[in-house]
Amino acid sequence: MPDAITILLTTIFVNNFVMVQFLGLCPFMGASNRLDSALGIAAATLFVMTLASSLSYLLNAWFLVPLEIEFLRIILFIVVIAAVVQFAEIVMRAMEPRLHQQLGVYVPLITTNCAVLAVALLNIKLATSMIEALFYGAGAGLGFGLVLILFAAMREHLEAADVPKPFKGTPIHMITAGLLSLAFMGFTGMS
């Protein structure tokens, strides 16, 4: 169990997919305008990353490797991710229709989020058991959600701040994202 906790903490902080590995930047910049929408997309992405990485691990271990058809890995993982995203969208539409409408195109775009596919593919290399695969996916999703929520809160704060005119909008958001990335890279010394 200590290995699983280590995997969880390192994927959240040390190897954060957005701030350290620079994956998933499109939803990071696009879905972080408001805190409530960031919470929704963070929860959906956490669900998708956790479930897709676990299912991909099982698919690889029980189907692809025994049949020696690992070359189909990317195609099958994308199908798994798309199915999980569709399931998440159906649940969100039924339980939180206002949030589903507010997020709009960002929920289906989780399918094309490179961080979700990267989690599934890296999981095959790094995880040695189903528990580790589950914690790796959950840690990646929690790290993504943490960064998304932090950035959304900072963006809302920046809207009320007195920012010089040349830096308003995208420039100050990029500077803020860079500083946030530097903060997360400070965790790389942890072991």
Image: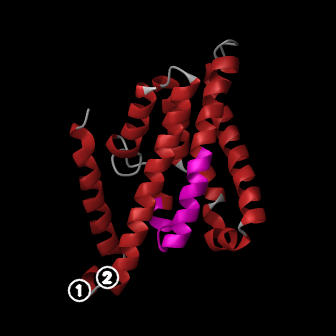
Tell me residue 36's x, y (percent): 54, 71
Q: Quadrant of residue 79?
A: top right
Query: Answer yes or no: do the residues labelled 1 and 2 have beta carbons within 8 Å?
Result: yes
In the rendering, at what x and y percent does residue 78 appear? 65, 40
Q: Residue at label 2?
A: 168
Q: Which mark is residue 98?
A: none
- Nearer to the camera, 168 or 130: 130
- Look at label 1 and name its amino acid: Pro
The residue at the point 58 percent across, 41 percent down is 50
- The amino acid type, in three-letter code, at marker 2 is Lys
Spatial CA distance of label 1 from label 2 is: 6 Å
Residue range (magenta): 28-48
The answer to whether 74 is drawn above or below residue 113 in the figure is above
Query: Does dot 1 land on a helix, a strand or a loop?
Result: loop
Q: Quadrant of the C terminus?
A: top left
* Residue, disc 1: 164
Res. 186 in view: yes
Q: Position of residue 174 (x, y in %)?
A: 32, 67
Label 2: few (<14), some (14–19) or many (≥20) C-alpha neighbours in 10 Å:
some
